[in-house]
Image (tube, helix red, strand yellow):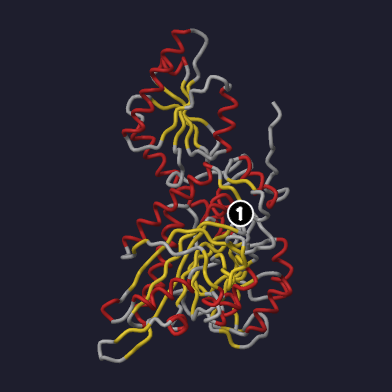
Amino acid sequence: MAQENPITPRATDFAEWYQDVVAAGELADYAPVKGCMVIRPNGFAIWENLQRELDQRIRDTGHENAYFPLLIPKSYFDREAEHVQGFAPECAAVTHGGGKPLEEPLYIRPTSEAIICTMYGKWVKSWRDLPVMINQWANVVRWEMRTRLFLRTAEFLWQEGHTAHETREEAEREVRTMLDVYAELCESVLAVPVLRGRKTAAERFAGAKETYTVEAMMQNGWALQGGTSHDLGQTFAKAYGIQFQGRDGTLQHAWSTSWGVSTRLVGAVVMVHGDDAGVVIPPRLAQVQCVVLPIHGKTDEEAAAVREGSARIVADLKAAGVRVRLDDRENLRPGAKHYEWERRGVPIRIEFGPRDAKAGTCVVVRRDEKGKSPAPVEGLGKPIAALLSKIQGEMLARARKWRDERTHACDDYAGFKGEIDANPGFYRMRWCGSAACEASVKNETKATIRCLPLDEPDDSGPCVVCGASAPGRAVFARSY
């Protein structure tokens, strides 16, 4: 049977493969508005599970959820020059309402520092009002010219945390705490290994004093920024009037932070774990962790035995905490069901037919590996739950091995320029800190500094570009 909507092999065209997998897995589709996407139930379920996992971590670190307006007066952005300069090219503005021109354009939020810091300025009066630690789950709009589902769209979903603190040290701890939360989320839930590091001034969030990042490697060797945490210093507090009476009675400005991840992490899951048959979803993210496929047989007696046995399997799996789905649709042949669930990335498939019913066994199929394994039906729930945990760990290990094999220490800039095309990956090269050297690499190779890795031993030496003294190595890569 010919495949409907065939998936382009990764080795042929990785970009086309990605688009095919997103479509075939029913993760998302393009909306009528250019650059916007419709997140379909299978894709939205991944986001919901990610959201649930992250939201609990955010709460556990002392933050609360709130909601702020979608529309922000343009004048609010204008208060912080660097911020508005960074986001103005991406801003979409509402200029009319109720059939009349507005007195002032309203930006559809590209990020919420302007409105949230304004409100903090209203709420914070004393050091006793600090810290303020609020997160919101929301949509934002950035008028991107080149879009790709999940990775870069005009509208996307995210969470954005915004905090205000009494001291610089508190704010710095907050920034690193949330960076660690993002790294742990990526690795333990998404099974995506990440590097933690600082951004250079050229890559820093507009208006921030420091930006920290978690960076992941996709299967084509390109980098994807998974999440960022920004130390805003007192810049936004001064621009938006977040002042408080200190313990010594003096009027002081707060120290603020912001941090966020978005639906681009769904794209990361696709590009880190997917194969030529479709998306592969890590068990902790999967809406359906296991699908049971009954094969009813030819007689009414066989069909009844399969139905009864399938029901027992489902009940046992549910009792073990497995998110299970029974696919008893009679209008599809078994092969069509296998094909559909494989493309949707469900971690485990269980096949159960008349022979299995007689033998008290079933067939277990892992999505991340090829091949089938027989298993006894009796007490199946606990072994399947254990297998899901094993799959989660093995997916992370494979992704880490893939990344590590494509991470290179490089001291030869000429060699790097020839190598980055043939073998994309993470290139750890010494960099002197010069913006000119950073720009040269970007202009000549399209590779950027993804991060300056944190907590690494001294590795000083000559800059790979100019030969001047460099304090250590930066990670260069092409990126989405």
Up the image or down, 312 lies above or below 466; here it is above
Identified at 66% across, 82% down, the residue is: 437
In this view, the residue in front, 284 or 53, is 53
Can you say which quadrant of the picture contains the N terminus?
Answer: top right
Q: Is residue 2 left or right of residue 336?
A: right
Up the image or down, 99 lies above or below 310; here it is below
**Total labels drawn:** 1
In this view, the residue in front, 238 or 211, is 238
In this view, the residue in front, 192 or 401, is 192
Give the image location of residue 475, x and y in percent: 58, 71
Up the image or down, 17 lies above or below 192; here it is above
The residue under label 1 is which amino acid type?
A: Gln
Q: Secondary structure at mark 1?
A: loop
Q: Within 10 angstroms of label 1, few (less than 14), some, or many (20 or more) residues?
A: many
Up the image or down, 266 lies above or below 176; here it is above
Identified at 41% across, 14% down, the residue is: 305
In this view, the residue in front, 212 or 195, is 212
Could you say which quadrant of the image residue 465 lies in? bottom right
The residue beneath circle 1 is 219
Give the image location of residue 31, x and y in percent: 64, 49
Give the image location of residue 289, x and y in percent: 44, 38
**From where the camera sits, is residue 439 visible?**
yes
Identified at 54% across, 66% down, the residue is: 109
